[in-house]
Image (tube, coloured by chain):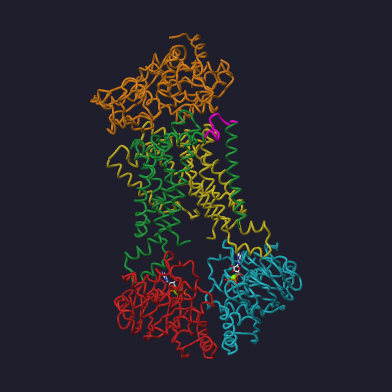
Chain colours: A green, B red, C cyan, D orange, E yellow
Amino acid sequence: MGESWALVWGLRGAVVLVVLGVWEWAGRVPVNFAFPTATATARAFAELLGSGALPRAFGISAQAFLLGYGAAVLVGVPFGLLMGLIRPLGRIARVYLDLLITMPMAALVPLVILTMGVRITSSALIVFIFSMPFLATNAYGGVRDVQARLYEMARAFDARWLQILRMVVFPSALPMVLAGMRYGLSRAFIGLVIAELLLAPFGVGRIIVDARSVFAFDRMFAAVLSVILAALLLLSGLQQVEARLLHWRR
Amino acid sequence: MVGPLTNVQRSATHPLGIAIRGVSKAFGRVRALDDITLSVEAGQFVAIIGPSGCGKTTLLKIVAGLLRPDAGRVEIGGVPVTGPGPDRAMVFQDFALLPWASVLRNVTFGLEVRGAPRPVRHAVAQRVIAKVGLAGFEHHYPHQLSGGMQQRVGLARALAVNPQILLMDEPFASVDEQTRRLLQDDLLTLWADERKTVLLVTHSMDEAIYLADQVFVLSPRPGRLFRIIEVDLPRPRSSQTTRASAAFGRLVEDLWGILKEMQ
Amino acid sequence: MVGPLTNVQRSATHPLGIAIRGVSKAFGRVRALDDITLSVEAGQFVAIIGPSGCGKTTLLKIVAGLLRPDAGRVEIGGVPVTGPGPDRAMVFQDFALLPWASVLRNVTFGLEVRGAPRPVRHAVAQRVIAKVGLAGFEHHYPHQLSGGMQQRVGLARALAVNPQILLMDEPFASVDEQTRRLLQDDLLTLWADERKTVLLVTHSMDEAIYLADQVFVLSPRPGRLFRIIEVDLPRPRSSQTTRASAAFGRLVEDLWGILKEMQ
Amino acid sequence: AATTARKLTFISTVNRPINLPSLIGLRSLQQDGIEVEVRELRESEAAVLAVAQGAGSFGTGFHAFFPAVERGAPVVALMELALPEFVLVARREITDIRALHGMQVASHSARSTQKVLLDFLLARDYPTVVPDFLYMPAGSAARAEALLAGSVRAATMDISFAGIVMRRAPGQFHILLDMTKLPVSSFYLIARRDVVEQQPQLTRLVIRRILESYRRGLSDPTYWVRERGEFFKEMSPAELEAQIREVIRVFDSNGGIDRLRGRGAIDNIQFQVEARNIAGPAMKWKPGTFFHPEPLEAVLQQLGRR
Amino acid sequence: MNRVARGEGMADGLPTLGALVALMVAVEVVGRLDLSLFLPTFSAVARVWWQLLQAGPLLGAALKSLVAFGIGFGAAAAGGVVSGTVLGRFRLLGQVFDPFLNVMMSAPLVAFVPVLITVFGISDVVVIVTVFLFTFFVVVVNTRTGFEGTDRRLVEMAQSYGAGEVQLFLRVYLPSALPAIMVGLQLGVVNGVKGLVVGEMLLALVGLGEFLVRYANVFLITHLYAVIATIMAVALLASYAVQLVDRVLIRWK
Ligand SMILES: Nc1ncnc2c1ncn2[C@@H]1O[C@H](COP(=O)(O)OP(=O)(O)OP(=O)(O)O)[C@@H](O)[C@H]1O
Ligand SMILES: Nc1ncnc2c1ncn2[C@@H]1O[C@H](COP(=O)(O)OP(=O)(O)OP(=O)(O)O)[C@@H](O)[C@H]1O
Ligand SMILES: [Mg+2]
Ligand SMILES: [Mg+2]
């Protein structure tokens, strides 16, 4: 067991090294005058961090993100739960949520820009549109998948409606809701990046676009990677929370 | 019994009888039950057996008050059933435990629903958990227990609300046969202890004859009462004395004969 | 038997005996089997019983050639087992049917793997499907069948390759007791028809005694051969005659006594 | 004239009426047996990058052209395609530029040419005025509509759209700040260095046809409307003509030769430094780093200066 | 991280059609109220759409988009299924790449689009690569899950009948992974269309994305809606197409 883990981690490390190596090599050749090396990108990243530009930018992006994702959670989860509790509503709303999930919502961005201009709220709206359907769909699925026998058990013990909600439905839906929050988060980040790139005004997107407009591609790479890093950090954070809340699943 | 419990655990001093009168139930076109009339005396152990789909579960749910019959009615201690009540508790085939709740929380579920204060809940839970042999497992989660132990939790949960009637739907169908035998004996001991009326649904002829005073055989499509078998084996029963007896073997074979007839 | 089949279905004219000699097997720290020695005479029906985790499945897989023992060996008809072979076929607890294949394709699976031409496959399949009572269901998919019917498919698949030895791992554990009884009787009839050596793993004392000539009882942790019970009930057996007999009841109770001892 | 290439890709940003003259010039290369494919990109830097990477031989170079060269992109500016075409339109009641301080002003994006021009002018003349920019990275039409709808009270836009705004709501709006008066170039015809070196004939031909189009249109703007072909079909001819007439003053019939060399070139670079588009000081830059006026000079020799 | 939810995010059949019709009616009614420039009537959008279609540019653009999509998706589907198969059949490789796959599944890959320009230059290749990136990982992960999810008991069953590696693969692993692979392809189509749109909008103005930006630029709201509707229609049709293939291939469910 221990050995095989050492092997697995060793190989993972090797994969990372190979990727970095190829990147560095491609930047040195260079494949393209615009393509920065890994080291240049690392340097730019350190600079952006050191100068405080990146933290500041993240501070701004975070506002749009929290506004959009927060609203999506506050609206999507209760709405999804409601859909699960009121079946006809669920069946109808489900179809529209499916459409929102299937359709490339990025196509709506120009419309958002035209109607709202570029403000924090426009970015937030895009983040909202991207993540809300997942949150609602999962909450809905969570309620819908409550095992019929648990309902029945609770009813057999003469539980009242609110008790069933509190003691059976919500805890039972929690894993799905949390999974939805995680997936929604990942989608929200996609929305944020699209908003930042297409609207390009405030946060990290601004660093990316500014860097690009002055052809500082090392800086642009660094900013891009920092967004991805931030997304992954947040996601793993949420995963921790999830693991803690769902300790009963082991 | 502890004093303050009385308002929660309504006196189970005397078990109640069940009277099922002309009950019918259809699901769309499927006539699950057709004019079932039978009665169970207070304190009796009664088994219901029949092929798959003959309406056993449906009948039990109607008695539990989870389903309304299309026709006929069920009376418990002479009072018509209108819904679930504290006089009945159910034990389920697949245990129906809350996976996110510890053994303790699962066992106290019924009491919590009925608003019993925490110290009362815990006192009662300790007692029934010990009774089903799970002392020390209070803080385990269902997935950490074997199937047999999970069903003990289900049993403890039903006992915790101290009902006069236990309704059991194939409670031992999901555990292996050796474990099942142990659980059956435990159930007999429990039942001897606190006389309750028991209505047990099963597929197992052996189980029905071994446990019950009376076996109701249902026939399918539509579900009808097909035969009543009186089990006059002496009590207390145990595997050695009861199962090894010729009378037991004969009763099981008779039952098998009846069931085969219907297939 | 049809002529052209012989090269595919190697002559099953005479059943083969099984000799298990000093077999041990460990999974990491778990000693699943410890020095098991037992032999099964050709044409005998043998049951293996024991508590959960005592290594019954492991032993069966070793005989099937799916697992290699850490020590000891298995001989079939005097020839050491080195892997799966056409002389043995297995029947699984949860049927192990290919959900995407029709009954026909499932039944012919073993023949297909062995490269039997299509007409041969179909001829054989028709015969065994009829034998297990599934004629007319050739083009159904597993999910369209009840549990009992699915296991009949599993049985037909094993019979199709006409093995000398049938290895059955709790074949009837997943069906309800009434269906199980029917399947048991069918199995007895089949076995009487085409004498094969049968090694049946089960949890059910009743089943072991009812079907087998000999019951091997394993004890767990580590899995050891604990006791051998000779079942001298007369054949042919049937529920009425066999199960209702006092001897049967006594044998089952003895077995239960042995198993309870180990728990 | 004989040429080596039969097909030529021209990289542009999203076309606006201001691009029409050069597009018509490019299309007239047909007469020389050269088919021109115009590819539009969203970002001005993308256009420069595309040319630098060889996705096309020629293209338009906006603001992003200078930092691209600074970073080593192998491209040069061959001629000026337009002077600044942007104005700041505001509601009539806003008469003082100082009133813009803290006011919401719609502009394209943070580093767009129009925004940089405005920044430059404000920094030079009104250093204390800091507007609250609202970015609408769509075309001028969108900002014009926002202005008309009352969502903002001032916006930067193409001069051609200023006319539309004032025609649609007579008396309500005016041009508060005219950036077209700045003596710097707005965007250029750019090409990769190796194309210029290896295909001098082609280079000259492209410049020449564009210049010819400019000259004919400058004397008669309806020429452009007549020759538009596939371009701007969703606009009525009258509408297009009106818009073209608004922008006519940003076209130079000599291809901006005086801003590609000598004093003008230095001023142009100076502006880029002051706009913090490239690192200073301006002295360290030689005009030849960015501008390559020789082909244009040759063409002007053929056609004569106007 | 297992997202092999069958038909997740997939709109199916009649209810979707009903929902779309309801949406159209709602848009028409709201449009008639003349509340805002941004809410044109459905009929107006339909009229413009018809005009654009007849004039040709929209159809040509859609075709261009579809070609880019087809290449990107085809490459991702083929590469994804093969890689997923390898990762699923060779546990060690699967384990090694597991965290990377998870990262690629949940990271906002859109952010890479600007980076792609620097690597591939500005060309349709960037759009194709974007489609590929958006599609590839879902397909890999689902394929792999499909193979790893193969029922051990079926494998043992087949082995007990003497099936060799090739037969095991063809008769057990592949058919049992197929539904998951199809789900991966379905999700891949959905994601790929998203990648297509984002790619087209973010850089090269080609295909439908070109029209999106163009009409937004000149503030032709009704035209914009017509293009959006076209994109949505393409997305729906693409996902239906895969669903159809799925139905044909996996009849036994
Ligand atoms: N909610 C329901 N909706 C529709 N039909 C139902 C429903 N519940 C049960 N049925 C049908 O009614 C009949 C009786 O069902 P029931 O579950 O009571 O049978 P059972 O005897 O408990 O069967 P088993 O032994 O398989 O548990 C069956 O045919 C079943 O399909
Ligand atoms: N592949 C394996 N890896 C690790 N341990 C295993 C493996 N297979 C079996 N075991 C362990 O070996 C022991 C015997 O397992 P086996 O499945 O043979 O028992 P069994 O008698 O068939 O049990 P059951 O009655 O539950 O089917 C058990 O403790 C089991 O946990
Ligand atoms: Mg039932
Ligand atoms: Mg086993």
Q: Residue at x 44, y 78 (%)?
A: B201
Q: Position of residue D172 (x, y in %)?
A: 24, 26
Q: Position of residue D190 (x, y in %)?
A: 49, 21
| Residue A94 falls within the magenta-colored stretch | no
Which percent across, then down, holds residue E178? 56, 55
Q: Quadrant of residue B100?
A: bottom left
Q: Is residue C135 above or below residue D153?
A: below
Residue E56 visible? The answer is: no
Nearest the eye: D44 or C14:
D44
Query: Can you see residue C84?
Result: yes
Viewer-closest of C196 and D134: D134
Which percent across, then down, holds residue E74?
56, 44
Q: In the rendered picture of this protein, how many numbered marks are placed on residues?
A: 0
Ligand 3: image quarter: bottom left
* The residue positioned farthest toward the right in the image shown: C78
Question: Does residue D139 sit above or below E240 in this rendering?
Answer: above
Q: Assess whether residue A33 is covered by the magenta stretch.
A: yes
Q: Main secondary structure of the magenta part?
A: loop
Q: Nearer the viewer, residue A77 or E169?
A: A77
Magenta-colored span: A29-41
Q: Is residue D186 left or right of residue D102?
A: right
Closer to the camera in the image, E52 or C204: C204
Q: Quadrant of the N terminus of chain B?
A: bottom left
Q: From what the image shows, is residue A143 above or below residue B10? A: above
Q: Which quadrant of the figure has residue C161?
A: bottom right
Indicate left or right for C7 with B63 as reference: right
